[in-house]
Amino acid sequence: MKETTKDKEPNTILFWYALIYNAITIYFIYDMEKDPSSSLAYVGTFPIFWISGAIILGVLFKKKKIRLESRNDKIAFVFSTPVPFFVLIFIFAILGR
């Protein structure tokens, strides 16, 4: 079976999902820094956001709206998870010592 040019194009749904996911995460972090008294509310908000994001990502995979065929798709997939957030926290914790 030959690959068509459509198969080689990066997945725009995954790109936009990762962009919106990270924009919301950055907004949460910005709001926590702006108002430290609200940071306790984010202890519950972040896990709920991550779980709902994982469910949405799973549904998109199940409906075959997202494919992991190119390197760009795999990078966008990693940025659609909380992994970069934890890596940044780890880096800042090490640099803060």
Image (tube, grey):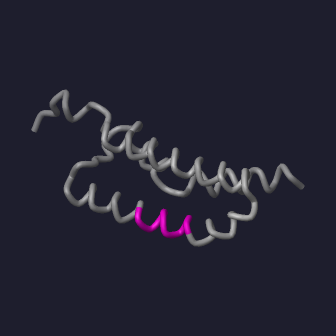
For the C terminus, the quadrant is: bottom right
Q: Residue at x 33, y 60 (%)?
A: 56
Figure check: 63 above or below 43:
above
Q: Residue furthest top?
A: 5
Q: Which residues are magenta?
A: 45-52
Q: Residue 80 location in percent, x, y?
A: 45, 51
Seen from this angle, which residue lies furthest right?
97
Is residue 49 rendered magenta in the image?
Answer: yes
The structure residue drawn at horizontal position 44% and vertical position 68%, both measured from the top left corner, is 51
Residue 44 location (% of width, % of height): 58, 72
Side (left or right) of 29 relative to 56: right
Q: Nearer the viewer, residue 51 or 5?
A: 51
Q: Position of residue 59 (x, y in %)?
A: 27, 61
Is residue 9 depicted above or below 97 in this figure? Answer: above
Q: Quadrant of residue 15?
A: top left
Which residue sits furthest left?
1
Quarter of the image for the N terminus: give it.
top left
Q: Residue at x 46, y 49 (%)?
A: 21
